[in-house]
Amino acid sequence: MTYTLPPLNALRAFEAAARHLSFKLAAHELHVTPAAVGQQVKALEERLGVRLFERLHKQLILTAAGQAYLPGISDGFRRIADATSQLKPEGAIVLQVGVHGGFDLRRLDLGPFRSAHADIGLRVLHPAGLHELVEGKVDLLIARGLGHHPGYRCDRINGGSGLGDWLVVPEGTADCPEVVSFREWLRARSDETPLANYRRRSRIGIVGR
């Protein structure tokens, strides 16, 4: 059976905005801008041919169509989340890795790490931020910023100064063998393919050629 579905990102934007009745709060949850959430919802409305929200001054209200649509979409995401949580990555120890939204997962390429560390299973949450790390939803986080977070060990994984990509881990687990293995592998990979070079190649359109 072939399922006719709207884009997943648009559905996520609608579902989050409908729960919060706010593009701003939905954006915070999804680690994007409010404008991006609004654009995704607008594109979904145009695709479906119905208005899902009434946009009033500083207020968002579900239309009758939006109210009817929301339960099925929320239930669908819940079922997907439940099915995913039941899957167990290979490995005696599972690391939950959060990755900030601006990081291209093609660059991460976890296959070599999995091959070299069969005892460590990896699960990736993308996008993710410090909020997910604080709540324990991820064990470690690849974050974009200056790398200063009290109570956390922050290791820069690309060269340069100022803003960069950092591996952020709670101090209490920073020296766990599986975390150390991932940190060392990530540093080595970044040395082989510097992020600055990757981004520069991306801007001029030659990545993946």
Image: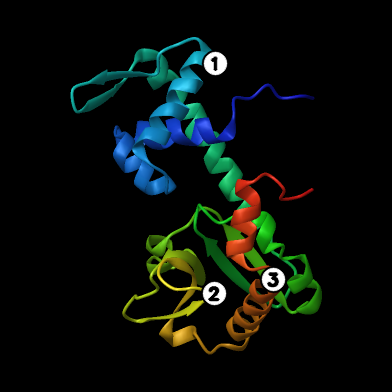
* Residue drawn at x 58%, y 34% as measured from the top left: 8
Viewer-nearest of labels 2 and 1? 2
Secondary structure, mark 3, is strand
Number of the label disc, if any, that sits on residue 47: 1
Instruction: State which tag comes first along the sequence, 2 or 3.
Output: 3
Residue type at numbered disc 3: Gly
Instruction: State which tag comes first along the sequence, 2 or 1.
Output: 1
Q: CA distance from mark 3 to mark 1?
A: 39 Å
Residue 4, horizontal then vertical, whole percent: 68, 21
Q: Are marks 3 and 1 in contact (CB under 8 Å)?
A: no
Number of the label disc, if any, that sits on residue 121: 3
> Dividing the picture into quarters, in which one does residue 180 lie?
bottom right
Q: CA distance from mark 2 to mark 3?
A: 28 Å
Taking 185 as reference, is 48 left or right? left
Image position of 14 with respect to 68: above or below: below
Residue type at numbered disc 2: Gly
Badge 1 local density, few (<14 within 10 Å), some, or many (20+)? Answer: few
Number of the label disc, if any, that sits on residue 159: 2
Residue 50, horizontal then vertical, whole percent: 45, 11
